[in-house]
Amino acid sequence: MGSPTDEFFTGLEDRAPELLPTTARGTIRFDLDEDGHTGYWFVAINRGNVLVSRENREADCVVRTKKSLFDEFASGAAHILSAFNRNDVTVQGSLPLLLTFRRVFPSPPGTRDPRERVRARLGVRTGPGRRLRTGRPGRLERQETQQ
Amino acid sequence: MKELVSILDGNTFVISDVQGDIDPSPDYPSGLFAWDTRLISKWVLTIDGERLTPLSVDDLQYFENRFFLVPGEPTHYIDAKTSVIRHRTLGGLFEERLTVLNHRNEPTVLTVRMEVASDFADVFDARGGKPRPGQLRQIVDHGRLKLCHQRGHHRVETIVTSTEPGEVDESGFTFRVELDAHGQWSTTLRAVAVFPGAQGHDVRENLLGYRPDRPELRRELAEWVAAAPQLTCGSKVLDNAYRRGLVDLAALQYTGLTSQFKLTATGLPWYMTLFGRHSLIASYQALPFVPGIARNTLLCLALMQGSRIDDFRDEEPGKILHEVRYGEPGGFEEQPRTLYYGAADTTPLFVILLDEYERWTGDAEMVRRLEFEARAALTWLDTYGDLMGDGYLWYERRSPAGLENQGWKDSAEAIIHSDGALPGHPRATCELQGYKYDAKVRAARLAREFWNDPRYADRLIREAEALKIRFNRDFWIEDGEYYALALDGEGNQVDALASNMGHLLWSGIVDEDRAEPVVRHLLGDRLFSGWGVRSLARGQRRYNPVGYQNGGVWPADNSLIVLGLRRYGFDESMARLAYAMIEASGQFDGRLPELFAGYDRKVTRRPVQYPRACYPFCSSAGTPMALLRALLGLQPHEEHLTIVPAIPEQLGRIELVGIPGRWGRIDAFGHGRLRLFNE
């Protein structure tokens, strides 16, 4: 299997419909620079469904960055809009389309569900049947440390 | 405090002293700012080496002002031989028309100097004078002065030019001005920001934003005002507050990076960017007047809805944004604000606004278009929003640079026990439960009428009803007869007496028999200052009349309480609170600030300014509109607008002509008949 970028685009057709709004529509091309040449990924979005190809075709939105940086977006380690803010990504055409496409990037590696973390830390039985200590206010004298 | 003068246009603004000069100050963020970045930090005018003294300042429009000045130190008797006019406008670029007048009967020669510099500080650092990482340079280039900041690939330039030739050096412009007897000389200085893309053209170049010029801005403003309902009323103060709020909302409109719709900036100077919460609330307040704001807010927040678990940004799938920042520190991840999601109230408020928007406008297409996003928001309420799995709406910060509290009271010590102790995490504040309840009740209507999903509608209603029952059991403090401010993660009630429970009336989650004691607290002398409901009641351990959210009075908070009082039929209390807010606005020349101090009205005869409050502030500008809605009893019912006025005598007759909505335009009239009782 290839780089995180290859894996990201390979799985995209399957993952995208669940993640993109049904109203999403348009074409995005990613121009990824690596060792003096440019690799292209062309994504056509229609009603939340996605088709991916390697064509260098005209698109509503053209995103250009380094392949090595896109690998980090693809793995969730970096955020495409932060990179855009510091000018390591350029965007031509429709920025809203990129904002919509942002929905398909994964969480940073090693991210845990915040619910599990809270419940594990408190070690209390949670859920609808949980007994609440109401009526008499109690409190923690010091703030709990944040992870 | 030093007197300051500001003009703004969307998210671009200039703050200077009364001479028109911009000087670095540790107390306030002076300068020309756009996109959270200071583009000019020094802009100081001298004539023959002397600073100037102001005679007067004219506020012409929100984007335009004019300073009349004379050289030298102020003396009680001014016999100036020279005077100066600085006429300043914003509209994409910053422009200052500088005119020097000679009042002598003979010719004269003057040296006019403008010192110019920029530190390109982020708005957060603009007071500290903390140097930014990266390189600063000031270059003279073909008669222009270029101020540049470069960090990595990120580059910003401010280019300053003058229409009259002068001597340009790296720190400003010098003009040798020869004036005839009674002659005059003028030049126009312009500053424009450039954000060059990394390679070739880039969407950021839209940021240049050569906005419409002055006549265009004037026309846009006139159209904005003309499209809103026209108010005629017996109270000049209310009239002024409404007009001022309407113009301030116009001033705060800006075009974001995505140019298809305008966004609403939040507050000058600290929050000149989009905040989910305040845009949602201002949109709600303004629905009967300028419904377009709500449409833009919904579209923009839907576009930026959370999509993944990202601890640094406190983001989860389906969550609605807290704020956007455009400054470069966000790009380098010094802080998570580029897109920050640390708010638990924005998600239910998004659903609430979508429903309310359709009720007023009849725009069913919008409800269908945003079905995916609204359902994702509702799913968030029951998944990541329900951290404890007990049906309530909870929050807990994960981002090290994020917000400790994630409701509207977002300062670190705003959620507290009566004795001042801080509760543990996670926290579930009471008003969040009201919003969650209301969001479900409203979403049930949307599911039934527009999404063709009656089973989902039934489920939402069942869940909302169950939430209401449990909420009234778990949050009610029997001894004090009020709702707890919050629950902590162990299920303890957080018992401070605070304004938050006023929102519960707005949401409709309060059991009928409990509304009366709640209202008694809200308008009792511990919470009600005489000018409004304090954020925290007097007598609570951490109460402080100049505490940001521990005693200050927030107009936006009060506006929702007023709507809640009306909803539960407490018309006299509603009118009393609305009238107090209107009177308070009169003390601020019609412009309600973000908040003002919570001192008792019997002690201070005027509401006292909170030192660092923003003004204009979008949801304070919308407050007079919400008050008018409550006083006239405006409520959309299917194709009609019902009007049931409850107006205090003091306000006389209120006429609101041309209320836009699904009915076309409707007029509302009401007479001031309610007599307010003094305690």
Image (tube, coloured by chain):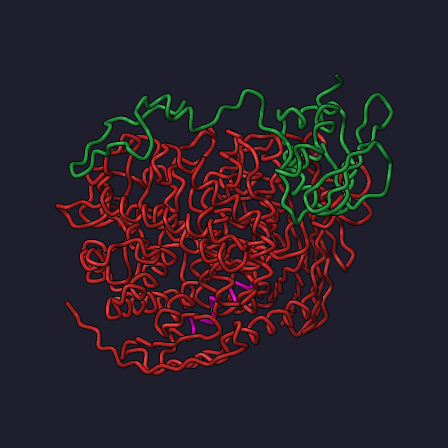
Chain colours: A green, B red
Residue nearest the observer in this picture, B284 or B434: B434
Please say whether residue B513 is one of the residues in the magenta stretch: no
Q: Is residue B524 left or right of residue A105?
A: left
Residue reaching furthest to the left: B479
What x and y, as percent, mark residue B5?
Answer: 51, 58
**Quick check: B628 left or right of A91?**
left
Q: Residue furthest top?
A: A1
Q: Which residue is pictured at 26% across the width and 46% down the height? A: B544
Q: Residue at x 37, y 33 (%)?
A: B389
Question: Residue A97: x, y in percent?
Answer: 70, 45
- State the count of labels: 0
**Can you see residue B145?**
no
Tell me the chief SS of the magenta region: helix
Q: Is residue B10 left or right of residue B432?
A: right
Q: Which residues are magenta?
A: B240-250
When the figure is inspected, residue B343 is found, relative to residue B12, above or below; the finding is above
Residue depicted at 63% across the width and 70% down the height: B218
Q: Is residue B588 above or below residue B166?
A: below
Which quadrant: the C terminus of chain B?
bottom left
* Camera-nearest residue between A69 and B482: B482
Q: In the image, is residue B246 part of the stretch drawn in magenta?
A: yes
Q: Work out whether residue A126 can be spotted.
A: yes
Residue name at image x 71 percent, y 42 percent: B170
- Using the rendered view, name the quadrant where residue B513 is placed: bottom left
Residue A77 lies in quadrant? top right
Task: Give the x, y percent position of residue B557.
Answer: 35, 55
Q: Is residue B658 above or below residue B513?
A: below
Residue B26 image position (x, y, % from top left) = 47, 42
Q: Nearer the viewer, residue A65 or B294?
A: B294
